[in-house]
Image (spheres, rainbow, N blue to C red):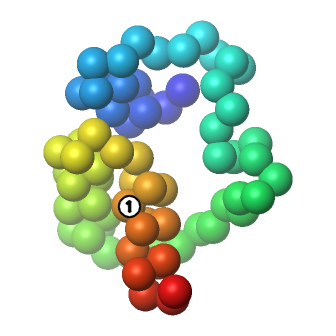
Amino acid sequence: MSKFAKLLKEVKGEEAAPEGRARGKSRREDYVAMKVYVPKELHRKLKLKAVEEGREISELVEEVLRKLLL
């Protein structure tokens, strides 16, 4: 589990699940990984927004992409 994921769990007040037990999006067949480049300041703001809302960055990005494309 990444340091950021652990921080999110702490902010949400959740206990971290033992490694290998949770089925994350990276292991789901209906999801695909993407690599994108964004300015550092935009990335910093995105991380802060995720922590403030107690969500993961991928959730925020998915939400924005759905609004843009659907």
**Residue with the mark numbered 1:** 60
In this view, the residue in front, 33 or 24, is 24
Left-right relation of 45 to 56 = left
Where is residue 42 shown, x and y percent of the image? 26, 70
Q: Number of callouts in the render?
A: 1
Position of residue 8 relative to residue 53, above or below, is above
Query: Residue shown at 53%/73% (left/top)?
Result: 36
When asked about the image quadrant of residue 10, the answer is top left
When asked about the image quadrant of residue 30, the answer is bottom right
The kind of residue tagged 1 is Leu
Query: Residue shown at 20%/61% (left/top)?
Result: 45
Visible residue check, residue 44: no
Position of residue 49 relative to residue 18, above or below, is below
Where is residue 50 shown, x and y percent of the image? 28, 50
Disc 1 packing (10 Å; few <14; some 14–19; many ≥20): some
Residue at the extreme front: 70
Residue at the extreme bottom: 69
Where is residue 15 shown, x and y percent of the image? 41, 12
Position of residue 52 relative to residue 46, above or below, is above
Query: Residue shown at 82%/53% (left/top)?
Result: 29
Position of residue 68 relative to residue 57, above or below, is below
Visible residue check, residue 63: yes
Query: Residue shown at 38%/36% (left/top)?
Result: 4
In this view, the residue in front, 11 or 66, is 66
Where is residue 63 shown, x and y percent of the image? 42, 68
